[in-house]
Amino acid sequence: MKLTVREELCSGCRACELVCSMRNFSQPNPKRSAVRVSGAFPAPGRFSLVICDQCGVCAEICPANAIHEVGDHYEVDPDLCTGCLICVEECPQGAMFTHKDDEVPFKCVACGDCVAYCPRQALVDEEAKVVWAGVEARKRAG
Amino acid sequence: MPKGKLFGYGGRIARIDLGGRNVRVEPTPEDLARNYLGGRGFVARILWDELRPGTEPLSPENKVVVASGPMAGLFLPGSGKIEMGAKSPQTGLYGESNMGGHLAGELKFAGYDALIIEGAAAGPSYIFIDDEKIEIRDAAKYWGKGAIQTEKEMKDDLGEDFKIAVIGPAGENLVTYAVVSHDFGRQAGRTGVGAVLGSKRVKAIAVRGSRGFEVADPEGTLRKGKEMYEACFAKPGFEEWTPYGTAGVTDWINEIGAFPTKNFQTGYFEKHKAINGPTLRERILVLDKACTGCPIPCGKYSRADYRGKTIYVEGPEYETIALMGGNLLLENIEDVAYVNYVADELGIDTISGGAVVAFVLECLEKGLLTTEDVGRELTWGDPDGVAWLLERIARREGVGELLARGVKSAAEKVGRGSERFAMQIKGLEISGYESRYAPAMMLAYMTADIGAHHNRAWAITYDAAVGQDKIEGKAWKVIELQHVRPLFDALGLCRLQWVEIGFELSHYAEMFPLVTGWEYSWEDLLRISERIWNLTRCFNLRERPDFGRAWDLPPARWLEEPLPSGAGKGRFVSRENAERMLAEYYELRGWDANGLPTPAKLRELGLEFVLDSLNLGA
């Protein structure tokens, strides 16, 4: 999967943040989401999204060699991570996240749930391996 | 699961004593959660328990309860609703309003189900909440500023990820229909909770949470959440309803003769197409804006140019189109957007605010007020005049003082028969449905616990389905809706997926046990909703010993004046028919002939404690 965004479609509902934290941390908590929504209001009135495009910079610069390519994405190995947070500083997208209760940062693992369940289809898999859940749902509904 | 551990809840209630500058955090009582769920249920029970009868609404003794619900902040459609309640300065009765945006979830992410705000601060303040840290901070730099401007400045000061509720100048100046605003266009709009916050000198509540919260069955909750989104995606309304949101209903409401026009003089507005949903979308829409988890964003965020000034506003949504469009004879969407913006910035409810302006215009038309009384020439269809008057009201300058307590109070002062067209019930201005040719909707307004608001029972679709002239058989439907719809307000949910695109209620019933771990059926949940409904009725009775049937009647215009035009031409609901509907309604509810819950009914609902403070006979 290769995540990309169509920000002009985003309604700011944060379904992506909620499904991400449920899927990866078993709780609703936008501060434990690897995709982030923010708004620019009152003017010009639009949302922007922070996503990981799996560029691999984090793996390249990690001094502990704790970030590895796993299939179509990069993962942090919590056993090797020393918590130096250089990756958080250096991520070009700002998509390596920390939580104040944790020592180890976290990032997108390309599960695709945000793509499947974005009601606006503002999050898209460029490779089309993950598609919007509405496609199948509509077929089933006839 | 460990005893006392609540799933689906933030788990704590914060009591914020402004006068003593003291914050106390307590665990959310399990029996409160089990018996009242959250949201509206928490507001009702806490206000019942903690307010002394006869409390002056704008005194430090009143309390504001802000309450999220067990299904708010979840990955499911429409999980973004929060309740704000207090004894209402507008009605003197139970007050409560529902608000979207993102505060409901954020409060729980910070670990709280509710805030109880009591006392009054010595000077302008705001409540700062960042997980465990709760502070009463100085708000002098924001005081006096507009609601939209304040939210923007506070986000700049605190961080974009804070979710902030604010009041505008109208709330500061204790206008009794002042709103609490949030997310640049969402409001807890009704019953004047903004004025109660103003009386406590609370300009804002800023919340950020990082703790999240636990659900009983995380895997099941995720699976069911996905299923719920898929079900929404598959509904035809997902694509058909969303582009126009609530504004999409304008043409239909007008067609059935229910569009408030010229202070409810009639139910048909000839220029409705100039202010409807498609016109909004074509002319001023910037983007579709959603509350937490919503797949069908009704927020139509807009930009309009008005006399060389560019304004941004979320809306106008249907109620604003009705009360500030047709009801004031504004004939284009930019004008409605402009007055919507003015009201939002001042922090005035567009429903009550529109009704107040319309009342003034009709008083001028009938010679009951003069241009000298008002201080400016005002006419129907004049957006500058509307903006000018709203400003006077928010600042309580000149005629604004007369109008700052709503149309009921204004009519008492103007007198000379003006009360017949002061469009309110229980002191709350009627929202966007002219009901002389929609008796179920009229009954819904008559019996709504906070006064004439539509969100308790949007029964107008039932009128259209079974016959707009029929009186009999409407009461049971109103009651059914009054249990289902307010249940959403107790759970922290938005009802529009169900109302507008036909999303099935069974989904919520299936989700509830996965979230909370409690095996409640839908019927169990409806029973709780009925409990809350009876409790708020009793709250009103406790405040006003004369409370009962007479309080449920609409203004004389609706009972005596035939509609002059539109689909309902010649129609009205006679006083006799209104009384008949009430009699049927009371009987079905298990209330007495005066509309008071019987002791038997209260015991059946687990409300025995209410009997101690009320005189309800045997």
Image: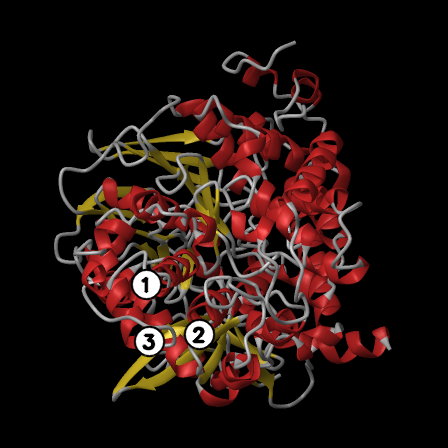
Q: CA distance from mark 3 to mark 1?
A: 16 Å
The answer to whether B502 appears left or right of A33 in the picture is right
Which chain is mark 3 on?
B
Which chain is mark 1 on?
B
Do dots 2 and 3 share one subunit? yes
Q: Is residue B234 above or below residue B571?
A: below
Mark 1 burial class by Cα count in 10 Å: few <14, some 14-19, many 20+: some
Residue that label 3 marks: B383
Q: Is residue A23 or residue B139 the one in the foreground?
A: B139
Which three-letter amino acid code belongs to the residue tagged 2? Answer: Leu
Which three-letter amino acid code belongs to the residue tagged 3? Answer: Pro
Q: Is residue B613 or residue B324 the one in the foreground?
A: B324
Q: Which SS class for mark 3?
A: helix
Mark 3 burial class by Cα count in 10 Å: few <14, some 14-19, many 20+: many
Residue that label 2 marks: B329
Q: Residue B554: name its quadrant.
A: top right
Measured as percent of width and height from the top left, residue B100 is found at: 48, 58
Q: Residue at x 38, y 58 (%)?
A: B359
Q: Residue A83: name its quadrant.
A: bottom left
Closer to the camera: disc 2 or disc 1? 1
Residue B470 appears anywhere in the view = yes
Residue that label 1 marks: B364
Measured as percent of width and height from the top left, residue B331 is found at: 44, 81
Instruction: Please identify the residue farthest to the top as the structure is shown.
Output: B618
Q: Quadrant of the C terminus of chain B?
A: top right
Q: Is residue B525 above or below residue B235?
A: above
